[in-house]
Image (spheres, coloured by chain):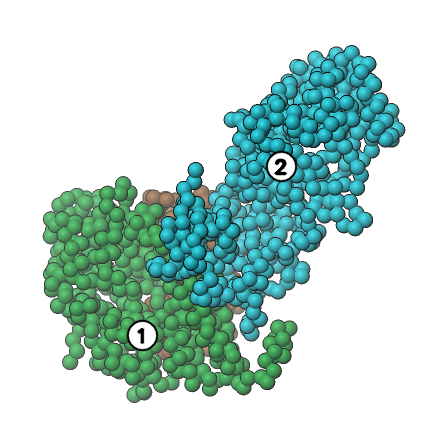
Chain colours: A brown, B green, C cyan
Amino acid sequence: MSDRSKLIATGKPFKFDKKRDTEFEQLVKRYPSRESMVLPALWLVQEQESWVCQEAIGYIADRIGTFASKVYEVATFYSMFNLHPVGKYHICVCRTLSCWLRGKQDIVNYFRDELNLTPGKATEDKKFSLEEVECLGHCGSAPVLQINGEFYENMDVDKVKKLLATFK
Amino acid sequence: MMQEAKILSAKFAIKNSNKLTVAKKHGAYQTLDKLFSSKQGDVIEIVKNSGLRGRGGAGFPTGMKWSFLPKGLDKPVYLAVNADESEPGTFKDRYILAQDPHLLIEGIIIACYAINSHDAYIYIRGEYTTQRTILQNAIDEACKAGLIGEKVGKQNYRINITIHRGAGAYICGEETALLESIEGKKGQPRSKPPFPAVEGLYACPTIINNVQSIASLPWIIQNGAMAYKRYGIESATGTHLFGISGHVEKPGVYELPFGLPLLDVINEMAGGVWKGRKLKGVIPGGSSCPVLTPEEAATATLDYASMAEHKTMFGSGGIVVLDETVSMPELAVNLTQFYHHESCGQCTPCREGLGWMEKILKKIVAGEATMRDLNLVRELCDNIEGKTVCVLAAACTMPIRALLDKYRDEFEALLKPEPTDAVTEASAEQE
Amino acid sequence: MTEMIKLFVNGEEVEVESGKNLIDALEKVGIEIPHFCYHPALGADGNCRMCLVGIEDGRPPVVPACKTLAKEGMKVLLDADNIKKIQHDVMELEFINHPTDCPICDQAGECKLQDYYMKYEGTESRMWVPQVTKRKMQDFGGGVIHDQERCVACGRCVRFLRQITRTGELGLVNRGDDCRVEFFPGRPINNRYGLNVVDLCPVGALTSADFRFKQRAWFLKRAESICHGCSKGCNIMVDHNKEKYEDDIIYRLRPRQNEQVNGWFMCDEGRMTYKLENDNRLEECTLAGAVRPLADIFADAERRIERATKVLFLVSPSASLEQLAAVQALAEKTGATVSAFSDGYIVKDDGDDFLIKDDKAANRAGVDLLGIAKSRTHFDNMAKEADVFINFGNDLSRSLSEEQIGRLFSDTWVLNGATHPGQLGAVMEKKVGSSIALRSWSEYHGVVVNCDGIAQKFVGGVMKNVERPDIVEMAAGLGSPATGTAAAWALVQKKIPALAEFGGFLELPAEGVKLTDNEAGK
C-alpha cells in the first residue's frame, strides 16, 4: 500500500449535512460503543463529499469522542476512503488474479493511451479519476470495473469505450 | 452429465427473488415455526450432525465452533456474519447476498437462536455496494414483517441485524480483524487465545460465521442433518458454491456437492480451458492455495482431504484456471503485490517481508535478477511463514513457494548470469 | 510473598515468580528474551515477533513469550535451532528497511537493534532491492523528534499515549511496510509526560530535541538518583559527563524503574530540572560583600550565633534527612530554632492523578518525621525575634515576596546558604552578612521521604569543578555535632526507628522503605 498519511485540508470546517446527521444518530444506536461509528461515519463523509478531508477526520473524532489519531489510523488503513478529491467518475479497475488473467491490463493501457489517465490520477477536467484496486469479488465476470459504486462486468476495451461515452 | 445441486442456489434464477414476497412464495422463512419450538441445544446438535464446515476457507465444523461458547456467562453473545469475501478467485457469497438475502436472514435467525444471541452484525466488504443495498432492503422488509426485530417467533425472541461496511481491507476477512473493524479500529488481527467464542466483539462471546455457512442452515433445519449428509462425502458433507474463474469458457458460480473430480468440474461445468488452449495449472480454492499442476489436478477431488493430500487447500472453493500462456513469474508478482498491499502492518515478518518478496519477484520478471535473488525469495517464503499473529503471510508464501518449486524453470529462464564478484555488485547497489 | 514456580529453560531448572509472562519471569533471574514491542507498563501487543520461544510438547510449539504465562513444569526452549533461526530472521526483516545511520543516530549505544544485531543476527545485508523510504526529522511536539525510517512499528509510543496519559496524540497510520507513526495534523504531542516516548522507543526513531546530538550515550556516567522536582520522588538516572577541561555537566535525566513509586516514567518538567543543576549556580562564598574562604565565614558566623539572643535556622523541605538532622543537632546545641517554612513550594492544583504533585518539595514528609516546624506563624514569630538568621538552602522567594523578606529581616544578621541566586530575593541578598554557595542534590548523597512516606536513597554523582559544601558540611562548619553524613545518619536513625536497621543510607533497598501512610503535599 502506498503512503496515505498526507491528509488534505480544505481550510473550511467540516459538518455533516442534515441527512447524514440523522443517519449518524440512527446508526449510533445500533452499537454498544460509540467507537464503532468510526467506519460508518467515514462512509457518511465520503457519501457527502466524495472524499475525506483532514477537517472531516477531526470532526468525526470529536463527534464520536475518540482520539483524532485513531480516526486518522482508520482512514489511512482502509483503502476505499478517498483521502484526496476524485473525479466526477471514479473508475476502479480490479488488478488481481482473475481480472489480470482475463485482460485488465488492456483496459488500464487504454486509459493511459487514450485519456492520458494513469492509476492514482484524474483527467485534467476532473471528469475521470482512475485507481487500480485489489480483487473486487467479481472474478467470474472478469475483468471488472467499479465506477462510483456500480459494477461493470466482462469488460474489454470496446465495452469501456462505449461505456465512457455514456458518462456526461 | 454432472448436475448442479440446489440447496443454496435454489432461488438464484428466480426473478426478484431478493424481495420478501417472492422469496416467501418459494419457501423462505418456513423453518421458523420448527425452529422456535425446538430447544436451542437441539439446533446445535442438528448442525453438528449435519457435518457442516465453515465455508469461508478454513473449513472448521460450524456446530463445534458454536459449542465453544462458554455457558452461564452474564454477557451478551454476538453473531458476526462474515461477508467480507475478498480472497482473489472467490465470489460466491455475493450471489447469496444479492440473489437470496432472505436465505441469509433466515440463517441468521437460526444461528442467533442456537447460540442465544440477539445481535447480529453482517460485516460486508465496502466494495459490495449494490449487494449491501439489496441486503439492507431485505433486512428492512423482514423487520417490517416481524420476522426479525423485538419479538420473533413463538418465544418472542429479539433479533437485531446490523450491516457494518468494510472499506477495502482484505485482512478484515480474518475473524478477529473483522471484530476490530466493527469496533471502529484498524483491521489488525488479535492474538489468540482468547478465542472470539470466549472474548470476541466488545470482549463478549462471539461467533463468526461465513455467509454461505449461515445460508446453509435453513435447508439443514428444514430437511434434517441426515438429508444434508447425503450430499458430498463423509469428511465434507453438503454442497458448496464453487466459483470458477480465469481461463475457462464459462466462468461462474456452480453449486455442487463436495468430492467431485476437479478437472471434471472445470470441463463439464465451466466448459474447460478457453480458446482450446492447454491447461497450465489450477489454483483450487482462492489465491492463497498452492497451485496444482495439470498432473496433480487430474487426481484431485473437490474436498478438504483430497486437497490436503495434494499439499494444497480446499480454501473457499474459488477455482482459478491458468492456461498455457500464463507467465508464472508474473503471476507470482500479481499475487505477492496483492498480499503486500493487504498486509496490515502489525507483525514484523509480514510487514517487512511481503514487500521485500514483491520487489525481488519484480526484479526477476524485469530480467535484472540473478540466482541469488531467486534463492533468496524462495528462502524468504520459509522465513516469513508461521511467525505471525494471523495467516496472511502464509497465504502469500504458500502459493509463491508452490509457483517457485513447481515452475522453477520459468523463473530461472529470466535470470541473468551471476556476477563474478558478488561483493562488488552488492556494494555498488548500496550506493 | 510471591509464589514461586519451577520451570525449565533449555533443559535447566529455574525458579521464577508465578503470575508473570515469560519475558518478565525470566528477566528476574537474568535470562533475556529479546523483544521490541513488549513493555511491562504497556502490556503485551505481540507485533514484533522477536520474543517467539519454543515450548517443548506445547501446542502451538512456538509462542510469543510476552503473551505466555510462566507455568509450573513448562519446558521453554531459547537456544533451539528453530528459535535461533526465528530470531535471526525477524532481525533481518527488521533491518531491511532500516537506515544504517548509527554513526549519526542518537540511540547508538543504547539501541535494541544494535544490541540484538550483535547477539542474534550478525550477517551481511541481503537487501539487494531499494528500501522503503519515509519521512525524516519530524517535529512531533513536546520536544520529541521522529525519524520514520528508523521506526520498527512496535507501537510503544502509541500505546503509552493512549493507555497512560490518555491523550492519544500518536497513531500508526497506513498499513503494511508503509505503516508509520504520525500525529493528526494540528494535534501534536501535548501533555506533561510526552518525553517518556523517547525512553520507550527501543530504537532511534524517537529522540529528544533537548538531548539529541549533545553527547554519545557511551560517554555518559550514570548516577541513580531521585527527582527533586516534587514530592513524588520519581526514581531517575542522572546522565552526566565531565569533558576534558570542562565542568561536570548533566545532559539528561531519565526515569528509573520503581514499581511502587513512578513505575517506569517521570514528568517532562522533572526531566528538565537538570538545567537548574547546570546553570546559574552560585559559586562564591562572601563575608560582608567580599569573597572569602569558607573557614572565615564559618568562624564569623559561629561567633555571631554564640553572641545572639535568638537564632533562627531555615531549612529546605527538599533537603535530605541527613541534612535536616545535622541542622537540627546544631540548633539543639546552640539553642536556635529550626523552621522548614515553605508554603510557596506548594503549587495548588498543579498536580494530577499520575506523578505530578502540588508539593514541589522532595522531602516534606521527612521534615514532618523529624518534627521540624513549618508553619507560617511559627516562622513569622521567630523571624521577628531573631537577631541572627541562617538559611540552609531554602528558596524563600517561593513563599514570600522580596518586600516581605526584607521586612522580616530588616534588623537581622543573615547568612544565606543557597544553590542559586535569588532564593532570598535580590534585595535581601545584597544586604546579607555572609553567603555560602551550596551543593545541589545531584552533587550529594542522601535519603528523602516522598509524599507516600517512602524513604528513598539517592546518589550524587556530579563532581563540580568549584568545591562547595553541602548542608551537612555547612552545619558541621558552624559547630554541629554531626560532623559528617555518617554521623548525621545516626541522628536520623534515632528519630526514625524504622530506619534503624540500615547501617548506612546505601543499605536502603532500591525500591525504598515505606515509613508511614503519610499523604503530605496533596
**Which residue is more in the foreground, B333 or C94?**
C94
Q: Quadrant of residue C295?
A: top right
Q: Quadrant of residue C333?
A: top right
Disc 1 residue type (three-letter): Lys
> In which quadrant is the C terminus of chain B drawn?
bottom right
Q: Which tag is nearer the camera, tag 2 or tag 1?
A: 2
Would residue C98 be visible to someone looking at this image? yes
> In which quadrant is the N terminus of chain B drawn?
bottom left
Q: CA distance from mark 2 to mark 1?
A: 66 Å
Q: Which residue is mark 2?
A: C506
Left or right, C461 with respect to A71, comes to right
Disc 2 residue type (three-letter): Leu
Q: Is residue B353 above or below residue C258?
A: below
Q: Residue at x 29, y 55 (%)?
A: B208
Q: Chain of mark 1?
A: B
Q: Residue at x 25, y 52 (%)?
A: B68
Q: Is residue C481 above or below residue C28?
A: above
Q: Chain of mark 2?
A: C
Q: Residue at x 46, y 84 (%)?
A: B412
Q: Is residue B429 above or below residue C73?
A: below
Q: Which residue is mark 1?
A: B311
Q: Which label belongs to residue C118?
A: none
Left or right, C385 with respect to B292, comes to right
- Residue B61: x and y, percent? 23, 61
- Residue B362: x and y, percent? 49, 76
